[in-house]
Image (cartoon, rainbow, N blue to C red):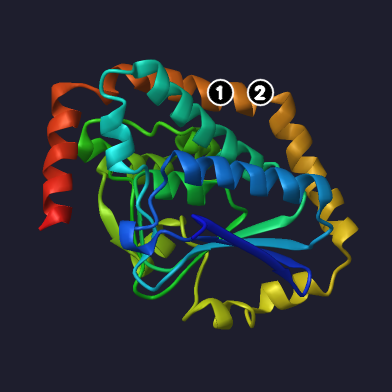
Amino acid sequence: MSEVITYQRDEIDYIFLNRPNYGNCIDENTAEKLSEIIREIRMKSQSKLVVLTGEGMKYFCTGGDLNTILKFKNNLSGLESFNLKMCDVIYQIAMLPQITICFINGYALGGGCELASAFDFRYASHNAKIGFIQGRMGIPTSWGGGTVLQEKMSHQDWITLLSSSNIYTAFQAKKIGFIHELSKDLTSLHNESFISLAKSIPAQIHHQNKKILIRKWTEQNLKRRMEEEVISAMPLWFSDEHIKNIEQFTKKLEK
């Protein structure tokens, strides 16, 4: 079974994280598959929109796979490569010429929120829970998501999300500005007025509009700044506090 499912319909590319039994978390295979899919969409697809969500009804994405992280406990360079891979995935999503939308269909935690930050629009189901919980785990944002989100939110809202390490309801996250709209499910998402209007506009118009933003971020060295976020976070990843928090969290999941 593939860790990521993708298909195109009605000029929309759909991407599903397909590890519902593991909270749709990201391991090395998932990161590589996501990278391949995004590259394929950028190079070959003439779609108008790209939509990413999580398989199932409980999880959007709960960040990095904890077993993968613990595997790198004595291999810091391996962990750095994994984090830089996800940094590149987030950057490539942000730079897609299509309008990008993520539908947060459940829990979005830690790196899952960083992944969601890459998208032009973030929709959420009413039962979604959103939390940049990295701080309570003993680390900062580490996939470049903090940097890319800073481009999209006010300073006050941005620092509130990252520094509180709180888990918000979908309604609360909308009030802060991280979530743009609430939608019952993926089917209902298609009926949102903006999406209906966007589907009626030629793809090349969307692509030209996005070029303005892509040019700005290229000139402002967004990729380099995201990578600096990854590198600067590395010394904290295997601190005693972070390892203890990971092991405690893993034990809770096993119960």
Residue 71 sits above or below residue 45 on the image: above
Residue drawn at point x = 25 percent, y = 36 percent: 135
- Residue 117 percent across, percent down from the top left: 51, 47
- Residue 34 percent across, percent down from the top left: 57, 47
Say which residue label 1 marks.
225
Label placed on residue 177 = none
Q: Is residue 210 left or right of residue 80?
A: right
The reply to whether residue 57 is in sight is yes
Q: Is residue 221 left or right of residue 140?
A: right
Count neighbours of disc 1 (C-alpha within 10 A) and say few if under 14, some if 14 to 19, many if 20 or more.
some
Residue drawn at point x = 46 percent, y = 55 percent: 178
Kind of residue sitting beneath label 2: Asn
Q: Is residue 93 left or right of residue 146?
A: right
Instruction: Identify the element where label 1 is drawn.
Output: helix
Q: Mark 1 touching mark 2, by CB under 8 A?
A: yes
| Residue at the farthest front position | 1
In the image, 224 versus 82, the foreground residue is 82
Kind of residue sitting beneath label 1: Arg
Label placed on residue 221 = 2
Q: Would you identify the image quadrant in which residue 255 lies?
A: bottom left
Instruction: Identify the element where label 2 is drawn.
Output: loop
In the image, 4 versus 106, the foreground residue is 4
Q: Would you identify the image quadrant in which residue 66 lies?
A: top left
- Residue 74 percent across, percent down from the top left: 27, 18
Q: Would you identify the image quadrant in which residue 192 lies?
A: bottom right
**What is the distance, in whole Å, between disc 1 and disc 2 at their CAs?**
6 Å
In the image, 103 versus 168, the foreground residue is 103
